[in-house]
Amino acid sequence: MSKWNYLGPIIGALVATGAVANPAASQPALTISDSSNQIVGELTKEQLSTKFKNKTITTQTPWSNGDLLTYRGPKVIDVLKDVGLENAAAIEGYAANGFSAKLNMADVKNYSPILATEIECTADLIAKDKCTQGEFVALSVKEYGPIFVVWPFDQLPDAVDPRDHSKWIWFVTGIRSVE
């Protein structure tokens, strides 16, 4: 009998029980750089959920057809404070698909957007047995995750054009200070 006949079930059990670390969990999900592109911080999704106080925002998005959705994640400003970039004039968020958008720091401070990593279970997710009412689940790519910059849509004043959808950055992988 080969060693794989013995090791296969053991490895399977270790993976199934979580005894073997998930390599993706230790990979940075968000890289933060200063205006000279020097990396000042890297955070995993777990760190975003545990290192910072998480805030929930119940809001519609430009794509939710008026439906209110509840998101959870750390405030953008708290993440910036952690790496000393809270006084930047602006920041630029980068997405995995190459999209980027500049965010005015005054708006970030005034409206407290979050780096959402979770969404409260929706009727659609309940129907698919993905979660139960009131439970939060990790944002999927379909829900603009795994990290999505979420703003309190209904609180944005006319001066901050609510039709400017570029500030709603999804699949965020990086933030850079802009001077």
Image (cartoon, rainbow, N blue to C red):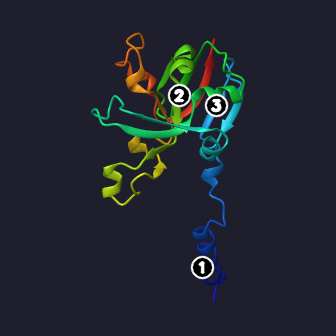
Residue under pointer 1: 9
**Sequence-earlier tag: 1 or 3:** 1
Pointer 1 with pointer 2, Cβ within 8 A: no
Instruction: Residue 23 in the image: state x and y as whole percent.
Output: 63, 54
Q: Residues within 10 Å of mark 2 (few under 14, many from 20)?
A: many
Q: Which residue is mark 3?
A: 79
- Residue 88: percent from left, percent from top: 65, 15
Q: Secondary structure at mark 2?
A: strand
Which is nearer the N-term, disc 3 or disc 2? 3
| Circle 3 Cα neighbour tier, 10 Å, few/some/many (<14 / 14–19 / ≥20) | many
Say what amino acid the circle numbered 3 marks. Answer: Val
Q: In whole angstroms, how far apart are the C-alphas of marks 3 and 2?
A: 15 Å
User: Height in image: 51 above or below 156?
Assistant: below
Instruction: Find residue 161 and report its image quarter.
Output: top left
Q: Residue at x 57, y 16 (%)?
A: 105
**Given this view, does label 1 or label 3 mark the residue nearer the observer?**
3
Q: Residue at x 60, y 51 (%)?
A: 24
Residue extending farthest to the bottom is: 1
| Residue at image mark 2 | 94
Which picture quadrant has residue 39?
top right
Q: Position of residue 115 (x, y in %)?
A: 53, 34
Which amino acid type corresponds to the residue marked 2 in the rendered image? Tyr
Q: Secondary structure at mark 3?
A: helix
SS at circle 1: helix
